[in-house]
Image (spheres, rainbow, N blue to C red):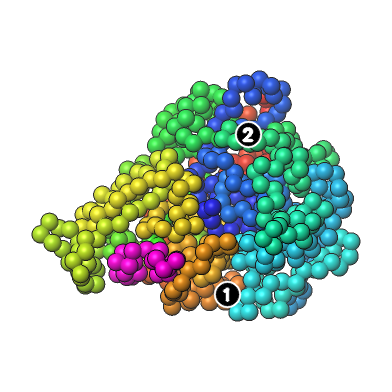
Amino acid sequence: MMKFPRILPSIQRFWLPIILTCTTLLTVVACNPSNFQSKAAKVPQLVQSILSDPKTFNYALSQESPNIFGLTFEGLITENPITSKIEPALAESWKISDDNLRIVFTLRPDLKWSDGKPLTVDDVVFTYNNIYFNEKIPTDARDVLRIGQSRQLPKVRKVSDRQVEFVTQEPFAPLLRTTGLVILPAHALRESVTEKDSEGKPQFLTKWSVDTPPDQLIVNGPYKLERYDTSQRVVFRRNPYYWRKGKQGESQPYIERIIWQIVESTDTSLLQFRSGGLDAVGVTPEYFSLLKREEKRGNFIIYNGGPTPTRLFMFFNLNKGKRDGKPLVDPIKSRWFNNVAFRQAVAYGIDRQKMINNTYRGLGVLQNSPIADQSPYYFSPEEGLKVYKYNPTKAKQLLTKAGFKYNEQGELLDKDGNRVRFTLLTNAGNKIREAVGAQIKQDLSQIGIQVDFTPLAWSAYTDKLSNSLDWDAGIIGFGAGVEPNDSANLWTADGGLHMFNQKPQAGQKPIQGREISDWEKEIEQLYIKGAQEFNDAKRKEIYAETQRITQEYLPFIYLVNPYSMAAVRNRFDGIQYTPLGGAFWNIHEIKITEN
């Protein structure tokens, strides 16, 4: 299963388009089939698409998109994607102690689960203490909750029937935002946590798989799962027990049904949108001019939110370890990949501006940092961040200085005479990534490197990246949020998403000889330090240093930020488009003006 940086559920109600960019660069929306539409023609509904089937309905075990959780679950707080401010969700208020070591939340009165049973403080305590903090459950939530050098977890305890307390032993600035992790139902899951399977593992590890009947999934978000047809569609129905109310006290959300059609082709979704059967479509660069001409006639608006927070990058497998005595990476290639000068030369050898001009039709900007441009902790090139402007001459100079050499045919050889050649993977069907990979292959051939560019089916690609670890280089995208610590599991050496030098995951065979470099350790320590600092100016400098290091050592070679764009039919009232949330982040208050 592919893993992605944990975008905290404080923004989950609008993070679907962000995380979906880990699979594509933009959310794509497709039409519902006519036979399904005819059965529900009078029901207010929104029809979208996803590129592949969900992999699990268990939030704690989920590591990839698409997933259902942005619609089905909420946490104590949420984060407004326009203002980036923290707002109440299941908790109506909170109080932070003067020493910043204690937060007491007060839950809203009369909260209920989708089955009508009360949602209480006991559910909050159970979710954190029995699931997120449970070392027998492999969840990425722990990575963003670990505090300081000790890596201790917060203490969570019940104060009263409506109050719950979070306590840390040392300062932890992201604590409030981390309480956006979704709350899970104790009455539905407690037994699966305590009961063991034949191997002594919690039954929770197989609980709420995609084979689970929808009526057995107990949720607290605006929608509950109504139906799932493998490789066809996911259908959500309004949760009648959802807590939000409109200005007149009416129940929210207003849209009765949401349908995610599973469509693997962006070209197909474009055709469906243009035919008038779609509610919205993600606007990729190659579609922009065409759709812009049809905007008025087609009765839709193209929203442009500016650069997306997605981080698209190329990266090498830096893992020096072995499994069953066999190196994960060919030792010859591993020596290249782990040579900083080699990675820098590759960065200089990629013409990213040409990528913007050709693949992105000018609708994008150069990307240089793991932290989103929208974050107050983003360190820009204007402030001194190192950038790699296209310079094949400099690339060749770096390579020759590092001991590489060229033969008479202009092919790059290492010091032992081995031809420099590696395989570059990405997910097939994503036209943008396929075009990016094809250009990288061409660009690097100009500095003598042979790239075997190989798009793979998504499942095969993710299996290589995170399970077998048998890969050379890849192209993929990660979502990024406002709070850098949300990606702590990416930058801590043993984090679940440290994918360029991945540790063995739960249930996998051990790896012998895995090495952690000094710069990896330094980034990890800076992330710990940054999470302990409450002064924003000092925090920015700490995270600026992490960005300096990532650009010097290049675990990821960042490419291009496209503009975040979507075309949405005019029949939806309440759209507040934002690159952090997309068009439907505030789904609870969006209305349909006509069916």
- Of the residues shown, which amino acid type is indicated by label 2? Asp
Q: Is residue 27 left or right of residue 175?
A: left
Mark 2 surroundings within 10 Å by alpha-carbon count, few (fewer than 14), some (14 through 19), many (20 or more) = few
Q: Which residue is located at x 67 percent, y 55 percent?
A: 205
Residue assigned mark 1: 528
Question: Measured along the vertical axis of the image, is residue 211 above or below residue 47?
Answer: below
Q: Which residue is located at x 40 percent, y 40 percent?
A: 431
- Of the residues shown, which amino acid type is indicated by label 1? Ile
Q: Is residue 17 left or right of residue 423?
A: right
Counting residues from the start of the chain, the first of labels 1 and 2 encountered is: 2
Q: Which residue is located at x 53 percent, y 77 percent?
A: 525
Mark 1 surroundings within 10 Å by alpha-carbon count, few (fewer than 14), some (14 through 19), many (20 or more) = many
Question: Where is residue 591 shown, x and y percent of the image?
Answer: 70, 34
Q: Is residue 161 left or right of residue 331?
A: right
Q: Which residues are magenta?
A: 319-342
Mark number, residue 229:
2
